[in-house]
Image: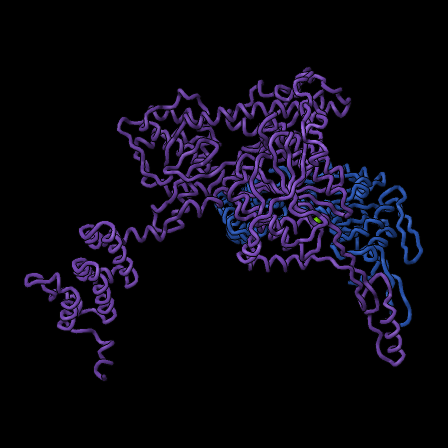
C-alpha cells in the first residue's frame, strides 16, 4: 500500500516507441494542449486505446509518465503523499501526484470517476491556471513546471449516477473523444498487436461490430479492441478461433446464459 | 423358503409362466389361442424381463385382457429395442390410446413399434420455439439492421418486421441439429428482410403458390451465397441443411444467383429459366414467401419513417437555429436552406451519415441514423423527397383553437394543480395545460407482500446480501498502516513498546471511511391501462423486492404511480411518501396498484420532480417503470407530441439536479426511446418476468 520510495525520473520514461495507431487528430490535439498547459480529459469506452495513447504521447513528448489507476479507496493522501513513521522520526513520502509535479511529468489519472469525491479537491487547483498542488500536511505549495501535464480518463458508459463527473471538474479539461477505430484501422491494430493474419483480424472486428449492435439490447458493452487483441493473441498461439473467441470475448461480455449462447452463435457464424 | 430365495433370481420355466398367464388373461385364451407360445417366448428371457412383463400384463388386463395379450406377444421385442423403461413408456402410450380411442387403435399402436421408436427419438431431439426465441432474437440483433421480433407460426416466413418461426422443430435426431435448423431459418428470413427480397413492386412477384415456393428456394440460394463471404460459419450451417442437393438443371438456373451482385430481380429471372417440372427441394429451413404482406408492412413503415425523418431533420434545423436566435412564439418554420443529408456507404454494411446544414456538417442524432438505415433497407436508396425538413415538424402559426379552457372543479378545492406542457411544434410551453390531482392508492390484499416474499425467498436473501455490501457507514478505522491522522493510542502504545526494545509496528493511523449514502430515490410506476395483466403483476413484485433492498440500505425512498385520462384529469397515486415508513398500509397500497387509464407521462414527471426536488440529498434519483410510449386518450398526446413532452419533462428534472433512469418494458419499436430519454439513462426489458429482479439490479448498479 505504501507509495514506492524510488523517485527516479528515468524509470518513468518510456524508452521505446509504443505502437499507437492514430485515429482522428488526437495526437495533434494532445500536443497543442501540452504546449498550452491545458489539462486533457480522455473520454471513451473501455479498451479503446486510451492508456496506449498516453504511453505513446509520453514517449513522443519525451516526458516521464506517472499513471494512477483510480479506485474507490483512493484518498487525497494516496495521491499527494503522507507522513510515515519510522523507528524514531516521521518522514514525508510524496504520492504520485506530488512526484509528477516535481518531475514535470505527465500525470495520468485513469478512470477518475472511481476515485473518492474528496480527491477532486486536490485536482482542481492543478487543473486550472494556478497549476499548483497544495500539500496540506506539509504546508507546502508546489508550482507545476511548464512541462507538467495532467490527463484524466473517463468512460461515459458508466451507469452509476454516483460516478458522473462533476461539471466543475469536467469544465477544466479539454476533452478528446475516443471511440473504437473504424473497421479497417481496428483490423490493422488487432493484426499488429497479435501477429495474426489480416483475414482473421477482419473477422474478429466483424464479430466486435455484431456485439456492439447488442449494446443496450442485452449487453452493457460490446467487445472492445482490447478483447479482440486478447482473442487474436490466443489464435496466434494456435488456439482454435471459436474457442479463443468464447474465452476471450463471449465470457468476458456476459454471464447471462441466453446472451452467452447468442454470442457463441455469432462467433460460429463469423468463423 | 430356501428354494424360493434361489428362484427369485433364476428365470421362470415355461410351464410356470403359462400358469401365470392363464391366471392373468385367461378370459381371452381358448383352446385355439393358448398361452403356450407366449410362455415359450418369455421363458428364454432373464428373470427381470419376465417379471416386468408379467407385472404389466396384470395391470393392462384390468383394463383390457385382449390388450394385455397383445402386449405380452410383443413385449420381448419391445424390451430388446427400448429397454425396460422405454418399453414401459411404449405400453403406457398404448394404454392412453386405449382410454381415448379404444382397443383397435391401441393394439395398432402397440404393433407399430418402429413408429414409436422414431417418435421417441424425435421427442428427445425436438426443440421448441420458446426455448430458442431469446437466443435467436439476440442473434438477429447482433447480425444488425432494424430490430426484428420473433413469433411462432406454422410455417417460417417474414413480413420484414417480424420473423415467424415454427413452434417446434423435430426433423433431426439431435437437439443440436434441430437448433441449427432454427438458427438457419431465422438467419435466412432476416436476410430476406435485410437483403432486399421484398424490394420490388407487388406486381412483379408471382401469384401462384408453386412459383412462390420456387422463388423461395432461389432466394435462399442467393442469400446463402451472400453469407458465404461474410459469415462463412453460418454458411456452412446452411449448406449442411441443403440436402438433398438441387438437381443439375435447377442448379444451373440458380447459378447466377451466387454472384455477389445478384438481387431479387435475378431470382425472378432464374425462376423463368427453371425447367417446367422443377420441384422445390425438401430443405428444413424453407417456409413460405408472403410478398403482399411484406410489401404492406414495408409501405406503412416507409410512410412512417419518411414523416419521422422529415420532423427529425426539422428538429435539427430548429435546434441549430434556435441556438443562434431564439424563435419568437408561433414563428412559422423557416423553410429555406433545408438540411442536406449526406449518406455514404462504407464497406459492406457500415453507414456513414452526415448532415449538412447552412454550410456546416455535423453528425446526426442516433434516431436519424436509425431511420436512414431503415429506409435504405426498404428502398435500397434514399430518394430526395425523404430529405426534406419541416413537414410534420412545422407548426401552423396561430393555432388558437387550443386555447386553455376553464376546467370546473379542478382547482384548489380538490387539490388539483396546474402544470405547463411542452408543445414541440411551438417550441414553448402551453401554460397551465394539465390539471393533476394526487390520491392515495386504494389498499389491496394484505397478504400480497408476504406471498411475494415467500415466492422469491431465495432471491430475496441474495438481494439483501448484495445490498448489505453497499450499505454505507461512516467509519473510523483505527490501527491502520496508513491514514489521514495518527492514531494516538496506537502511537503511544507503540513508542512505549519501543522503549522496552520491541519493534515499532506500522499500524499507527486512523483512516476515515467516508461512505455515507445520501440518496433520495423516487420510484414512478406506470398505472396505465396497457399494463393490465403480467406487467402490472411484475411491477408490483418489483416494488416488493425493491422495498426489501432499500430497507436494508436505509436509502430514503418514495413510490408513486401515475395514470389519467385527458389533460384535465391527470392523476398521481401515492404508494409511499418519503416521510412514510414501509408499514402494513404501504404494503397494501403496493398490492393495490392497478391498471387504470392512459399514460400522460410529462405532467406526472413534473409533479414528482417537484416532490423529489424538495428532498435534501446529495444524490436524487428518479426511476420510472413504464411499458412504452406515452399516450393519452385525446388532444394529440399520442405519438411525437407525447414523446417530446416526456423528453422535456426529463430535461427539466435534469436541470433540477435529478438523475432519471427509465426502465421500459417493451418489445416493440424502440426507435423513439433514445430521443425521448435524451436526458435520462434507460434500459429496455423484453421479458417481463425478469423485471422484479432487474429493477433491484438496476438500482444497485446506479448507486454503487
Ligand atoms: N489506436 C491504437 N493503437 C494501438 N493499439 C491499440 C489502439 N487502440 C487500442 N489498442 C489495443 O487495445 C488495447 C487496449 O487499449 P487500452 O488499454 O489503451 O484501453 P483503455 O482505453 O485504456 O481501456 P480502459 O478504459 O479499460 O482502461 C491495447 O493494449 C492495444 O493492444
Ligand atoms: Mg486504460
**Hey, which residue is sitting farthest left in the picture?**
B31
What percent of the width, then of the height, locates residue B93? Answer: 27, 55
Q: Is residue A223 in sight in this rendering?
A: no
What is the quadrant of the N terminus of chain B in the image?
bottom left
What percent of the width, then of the height, locates residue B523? Answer: 65, 45
Q: Is residue A126 depicted above or below B564 in this figure?
A: below
- Identify the residue shown where x is 78% and y is 59%: B474
**Which is more toward the observer, B6 or B337?**
B6
Q: How many marks?
A: 0
Chain B shade in the render: purple
Chain A shade in the render: blue
Tell me where residue B79 sits by quadrant: bottom left
**Which is more toward the observer, B527 or B284?**
B527
Q: Is residue A220 depicted above or below B349 in this figure?
A: below
**Hey, which residue is sitting farthest bottom in the picture?**
B2
What percent of the width, then of the height, locates residue B582? Answer: 66, 53
What percent of the width, then of the height, locates residue A113? Answer: 74, 48
**Which is more toward the observer, B569 or A86?**
B569
Say left or right for A58 vs B340. right
Tell me where residue B490 sits by quadrant: bottom right
Q: Is residue B333 depicted above or below B630 in this figure?
A: above
Tell me where residue B685 sits by quadrant: top right
- Identify the residue shown where x is 79% and y is 51%: A117
Colouring: by chain
Q: Is residue B23 in sight in this rendering?
A: yes
Q: Is residue B407 depicted above or below B578 in this figure?
A: above
Amino acid at each position: 500500500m505504501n507509495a514506492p520510495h524510488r523517485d527516479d525520473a528515468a524509470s518513468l520514461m518510456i524508452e521505446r516507441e509504443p505502437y499507437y495507431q492514430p485515429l482522428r487528430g488526437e495526437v495533434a490535439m494532445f500536443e497543442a494542449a501540452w504546449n498550452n498547459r491545458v489539462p486533457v480529459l480522455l473520454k471513451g469506452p473501455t479498451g479503446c486505446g486510451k492508456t496506449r495513447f498516453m504511453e505513446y504521447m509520453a514517449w513522443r513528448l519525451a516526458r516521464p509518465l506517472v499513471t494512477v489507476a483510480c479506485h474507490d479507496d483512493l484518498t487525497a493522501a494516496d495521491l499527494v503523499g503522507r507522513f510515515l513513521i519510522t523507528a524514531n522520526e516521521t518522514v514525508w513520502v510524496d504520492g504520485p501526484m506530488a512526484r509528477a509535479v516535481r518531475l514535470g511529468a505527465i500525470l495520468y489519472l485513469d478512470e477518475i470517476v472511481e476515485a473518492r469525491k474528496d480527491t477532486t479537491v486536490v485536482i482542481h487547483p492543478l487543473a486550472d491556471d494556478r497549476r499548483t498542488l497544495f500539500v496540506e500536511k506539509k504546508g507546502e505549495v508546489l508550482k507545476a513546471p511548464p512541462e507538467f501535464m495532467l490527463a484524466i480518463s473517463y468512460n461515459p458508459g458508466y451507469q452509476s449516477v454516483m460516478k458522473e463527473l462533476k461539471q466543475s471538474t469536467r469544465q477544466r479539461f479539454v476533452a478528446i473523444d475516443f471511440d473504437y477505430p473504424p473497421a479497417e484501422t481496428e483490423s490493422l491494430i488487432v493484426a499488429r498487436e497479435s501477429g495474426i493474419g489480416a483475414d482473421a483480424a477482419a473477422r474478429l472486428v466483424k464479430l466486435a461490430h455484431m456485439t456492439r449492435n447488442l449494446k443496450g439490447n442485452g449487453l452493457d458493452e460490446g467487445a472492445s479492441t482490447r478483447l479482440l487483441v486478447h482473442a487474436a493473441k490466443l489464435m496466434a498461439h494456435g488456439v482454435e478461433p471459436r474457442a479463443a473467441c468464447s474465452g476471450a470475448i463471449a465470457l468476458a461480455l456476459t454471464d447471462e446464459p441466453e446472451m452467452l449462447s447468442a454470442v457463441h452463435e455469432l462467433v460460429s457464424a463469423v468463423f | 423358503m430356501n428354494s424360493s430365495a434361489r428362484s427369485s433370481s433364476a428365470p421362470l420355466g415355461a410351464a410356470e409362466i403359462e400358469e401365470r398367464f392363464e391366471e392373468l388373461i385367461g378370459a381371452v385364451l381358448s383352446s385355439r389361442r393358448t398361452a403356450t407360445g407366449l410362455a415359450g417366448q418369455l421363458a428364454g428371457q432373464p428373470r427381470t424381463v419376465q417379471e416386468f412383463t408379467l407385472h404389466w400384463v396384470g395391470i393392462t388386463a384390468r383394463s383390457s385382457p385382449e390388450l394385455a395379450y397383445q402386449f405380452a406377444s410383443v413385449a420381448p421385442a419391445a424390451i430388446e429395442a427400448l429397454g425396460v423403461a422405454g418399453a414401459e413408456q411404449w405400453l403406457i402410450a398404448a394404454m392412453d390410446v386405449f382410454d381415448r380411442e379404444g382397443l383397435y387403435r391401441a393394439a395398432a399402436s402397440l404393433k407399430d413399434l418402429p413408429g414409436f421408436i422414431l417418435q421417441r427419438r424425435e421427442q428427445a431431439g425436438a426443440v421448441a420455439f420458446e426455448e430458442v426465441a431469446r437466443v435467436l432474437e439476440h442473434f438477429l440483433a447482433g447480425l444488425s439492421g432494424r430490430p426484428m421480433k420473433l413469433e411462432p407460426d406454422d410455417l417460417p416466413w417474414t413480413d420484414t418486421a417480424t420473423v415467424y418461426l415454427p413452434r417446434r422443430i423435430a426433423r433431426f435426431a439431435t437437439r443440436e441439429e434441430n437448433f441449427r435448423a432454427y438458427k438457419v431459418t431465422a438467419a435466412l428470413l432476416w436476410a430476406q428482410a435485410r437483403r432486399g427480397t421484398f424490394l420490388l413492386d407487388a406486381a412483379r412477384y408471382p401469384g401462384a403458390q408453386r412459383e412462390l415456393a420456387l422463388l423461395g428456394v432461389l432466394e435462399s440460394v442467393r442469400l446463402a451465397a451472400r453469407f458465404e463471404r461474410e459469415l462463412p460459419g453460418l454458411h456452412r450451417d446452411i449448406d449442411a441443411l441443403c440436402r438433398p442437393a438441387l438437381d443439375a438443371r435447377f442448379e444451373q438456373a440458380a447459378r447466377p444467383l451466387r454472384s455477389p451482385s445478384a438481387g431479387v430481380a435475378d431470382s425472378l429471372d432464374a425462376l423463368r429459366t427453371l425447367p417446367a417440372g422443377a420441384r422445390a427441394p425438401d430443405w428444413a429451413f424453407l417456409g413460405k414467401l408472403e410478398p403482399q404482406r411484406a410489401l404492406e408492412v414495408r409501405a406503412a413503415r416507409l410512410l412512417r419513417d419518411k414523416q419521422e425523418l422529415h420532423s427529425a431533420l426539422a428538429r435539427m434545423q430548429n435546434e441549430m437555429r434556435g441556438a443562434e436566435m431564439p424563435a419568437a412564439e408561433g414563428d412559422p418554420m423557416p423553410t429555406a436552406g433545408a438540411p442536406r443529408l449526406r449518406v455514404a456507404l462504407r464497406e459492406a454494411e457500415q453507414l456513414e451519415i452526415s448532415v449538412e446544414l447552412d454550410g456546416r456538417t455535423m453528425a446526426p442524432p442516433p434516431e436519424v441514423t436509425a431511420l436512414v438505415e431503415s429506409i435504405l433497407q426498404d428502398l435500397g436508396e434514399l430518394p430526395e423527397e425523404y430529405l426534406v425538413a419541416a413537414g410534420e415538424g412545422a407548426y401552423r402559426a396561430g393555432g388558437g383553437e387550443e386555447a386553455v379552457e376553464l376546467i370546473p372543479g379542478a382547482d384548489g378545492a380538490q387539490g388539483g394543480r396546474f402544470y405547463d406542457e411542452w408543445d414541440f411544434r411551438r417550441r414553448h410551453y402551453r401554460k397551465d395545460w394539465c390539471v393533476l390531482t394526487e390520491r392515495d392508492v386504494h389498499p389491496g390484499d394484505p397478504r400480497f407482500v408476504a406471498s411475494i416474499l415467500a415466492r422469491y425467498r431465495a432471491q430475496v436473501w441474495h438481494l439483501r446480501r448484495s445490498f448489505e455490501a453497499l450499505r454505507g457507514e461512516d467509519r473510523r478505522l483505527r490501527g491502520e498502516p496508513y491514514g489521514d491522522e495518527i492514531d494516538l493510542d496506537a502511537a503511544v502504545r507503540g513508542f512505549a513498546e519501543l522503549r522496552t526494545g520491541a519493534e515499532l509496528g506500522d499500524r499507527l493511523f486512523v483512516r476515515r471511511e467516508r461512505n455515507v449514502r445520501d440518496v433520495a430515490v423516487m420510484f414512478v410506476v406506470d398505472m396505465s391501462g396497457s399494463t393490465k395483466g403480467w406487467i402490472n403483476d411484475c411491477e408490483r413484485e418489483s416494488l416488493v423486492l425493491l422495498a426489501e433492498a432499500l430497507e436494508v440500505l436505509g436509502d430514503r425512498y418514495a413510490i408513486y404511480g401515475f395514470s389519467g385520462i385527458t389533460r384535465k384529469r391527470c392523476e398521481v397515486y401515492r404508494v409511499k411518501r418519503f416521510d412514510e415508513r414501509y408499514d402494513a398500509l404501504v404494503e397494501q397500497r403496493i398490492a393495490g396498484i392497478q391498471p387504470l387509464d392512459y399514460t400522460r407521462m410529462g405532467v406526472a414527471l413534473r409533479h414528482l420532480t417537484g416532490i423529489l426536488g424538495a428532498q435534501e440529498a446529495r444524490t436524487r434519483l428518479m426511476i420510472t417503470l413504464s411499458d412504452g410510449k406515452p399516450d393519452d386518450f385525446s388532444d394529440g398526446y399520442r405519438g411525437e407530441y407525447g414523446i417530446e413532452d416526456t423528453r422535456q419533462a426529463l430535461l427539466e428534472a435534469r436541470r433540477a439536479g435529478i438523475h432519471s433512469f427509465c426502465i421500459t418494458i417493451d418489445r416493440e419499436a424502440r426507435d423513439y426511446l433514445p430521443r425521448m430519454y435524451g436526458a435520462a439513462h434507460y434500459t429496455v426489458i423484453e421479458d417481463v418476468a425478469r423485471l422484479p429482479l432487474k429493477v433491484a439490479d438496476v438500482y444497485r448498479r446506479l448507486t454503487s
